[in-house]
Image: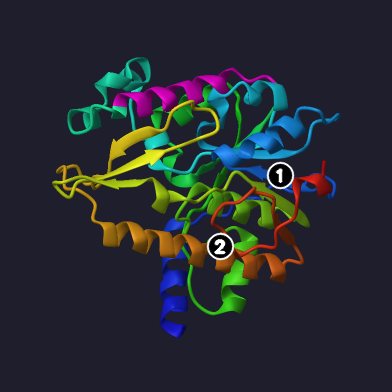
Amino acid sequence: MFFNTLLSIAKILIKSRWIKPVKALNGEPLFIVGNGPSALPFLAMAKTKKPPLPLFCVNKFAISPEFHSLKPHYYLLLDGDFFLFNETVFQDPSKHPRVQLKPEFTVYQDQINRTWHAILEHTWGMTLFIPRTYKKSFVVALAIKQNIRIQFFNYTVTQGFNWFKNSVYAMGLGMPQSQNVIHATLFLAIQMGVKNIYITGIDHDFHRNLVLDDTNTLFEEVSHFYNKEPFRHKLIHAHGNGESVRLKEVFYNLHKVHVGYEELHRFAKNCKCQVFNITPGGFVDEFPRVSLDTIA
C-alpha cells in the first residue's frame, strides 16, 4: 500500500492538473445509461417522463434516436478510438489505418464519426466529459471551436491507502482504473456529489458473446440497444501487428471489470452515495438491485 501510494503521488504530479469538478443537479438522482440491449425498457419509460430524467450517457448513444428525444445532461467518451484519428478519417472511415488489419473496423469508425456529428450538432447544452489526455486531438479541437461544453478530467489511475484515494478522487486528481466506460461514468457521477445513482444497460455478458473458431482465433459478437444485429469482430491486440487476443487475457480483463466496480462501490459509500442497479438481468453483482417499477 505504501509503495502504491508513493507511486500514485508521482503519477499525479506528472500527469494531473487541477480541474474544477462539476457539481450535481440540485440533489436530483442521476441515471447512468449503458448501451447494452437491457437499456431498452428504461429508455421506453424515460420517454414518458416530464421533465426529462437527468441522464448520463456514454460512447455511441448519440447515434440512436433516443439521443435527441431524451437530451442527456451529461455524456462521456473515454476510449482512445473516439479521439485518435484525423480529419481524413472523419470524412471517410475506411481510411483508418486499422482497417487494413480489420476490414470490419470501417463500421466501427463510421459509428464513431456519427457519434461525433450528433454531439457537435446537439442544441441543448449537454456537458461532454473527456480525458484531459485527448485535449489536443483533432476532433476535440473541433468541438471546442463549436462551443461544445466540455469538462476535462484526469484519467490518472490511483492506488494506495483508502484515505489517500478518497482524498485524491474527491479532488479529481486521480481515479480508479476504468476497465470500461461505465467505471469512469460512475466515478464522475459520485465525484459530482450525486446521492442516488441508478445504472441500466450494463449487461456485461461478454463471456456469452465469445466465439473461438477452429484456428483458435477469438471473435466477439457485441450487442447494443441501438443495433438490430450483433457486431462481430476479431479480437486482436491494439499494438497493430494483428496478433489475436487469448482467452486468458479476456477473462483477466473481466476480472478487472468487477474489481473496478468493487472499488467504486467503496468510494460511493465513503461519499454517502447510493448506487442501484436497475439493469434487467445482467452480470454485475456489486450493487443492490431495484426494479424499474420502483422509479417508473
Residue 194 seen by the camera: no
Residue 186 to residue 13: above or below: above
Residue 252 position, x and y percent, is 35, 64
Looking at this view, is 40 or 165 the one in front? 40
Q: Which residues are magenta?
A: 106-123
Q: For the residue labelled by badge 2, is the local secondary structure a helix, a strand or a loop?
A: helix
Would you say residue 121 sits in the magenta stretch? yes
Left or right of 15: which side holds 85? left
Residue 100 to residue 13: above or below: above
Q: Amino acid at mark 2?
A: Tyr
Residue furthest to the bottom: 2
Residue bearing the label numbered 2: 261
**Quarter residue 85 falls in:** top left
Q: CA distance from mark 2 to mark 1?
A: 17 Å
Q: Which residue is depicted at the point 66% across and 21% down?
A: 68
Q: Quadrant of the C terminus?
A: top right
